[in-house]
Amino acid sequence: MIKTKDLVYLFIIKERIFSTALPSLDIRNSYFECMGGRLKTDHTDLYVIVVYHFHFDDNNFLDKFNRVISQYKDKPVLIIGDFNLDLLKYDSDPNVDKFANAMISYSFFPLVNKPTNFFRDTATIIDHAWCNLVNENVSSYVLDISVSTHKPILTAIP
């Protein structure tokens, strides 16, 4: 289990697993918090990066975060977290457009396409799951349970 801010990510794995925290992914600055590690089973070798992007300074976040993901673009990676960038605003917010295009340029594709955060009368996709395992049968689901204004996301990687 990994906990950041008010989000909890739980990994359920059916086989023996070895994990290694990666100090290079333990990042805390004025723009975002990040941590991650390598999960290794008998069948899979996967890097998991968990991110919390603060509600401000999107340009500096994008620059610093691009440096992080560029180091892992050629490895099997799952990136999850509260990015505070609403993917529903892809066409209208230049920061969301820039972020999504950067992720896609590194061969990461979004696994979440339904709202994950509900506050008053708004619904947003600010909680993301991105993966570069395009040949695998990877899927994500937004669970319809209320833990906070954020809905939990379940990601299945065979």
Image: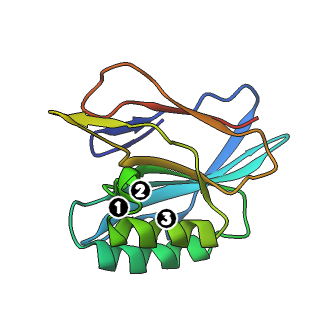
Say which of marks 2 and 3 sits in front: 3
Give the labeled residue for mark 2. Answer: 51
Q: Where does the image place residue 143, in percent across and percent down from the top left? A: 45, 24
Residue behind mark 1: 33
Q: Label 3 is placed on what type of residue?
A: Ala
Quadrant in the picture for residue 123: top left
In the picture shown, does residue 124 fall above or below 20? above
How packed mark 3 is, by other alpha carbons closer than 10 Å (few <14, some 14-19, many 20 or more), is some
Q: Find numbered disc 3 in the image and state the secondary structure of the residue it sits on.
A: helix
Counting residues from the N terminus, which is met first, the one under dot 2 or under dot 3?
2
Residue located farthest toward the left when viewing the structure as drawn: 120
Residue with the mark numbered 3: 100
Residue 37 position by quadrant: bottom right
Q: Amino acid at mark 1?
A: Glu
Q: Residue at x 17, y 33 (%)?
A: 121
Mark number displayed over residue 2: none
Sequence order check: which comes first, mark 2 or mark 1?
A: 1
Q: Residue furthest right?
A: 43
Which of pointers 1 and 3 lies earlier in the amino acid sequence? 1
Under circle 2, the secondary element is strand
Q: Mark 1, mark 3: which one is toward the viewer?
A: 3
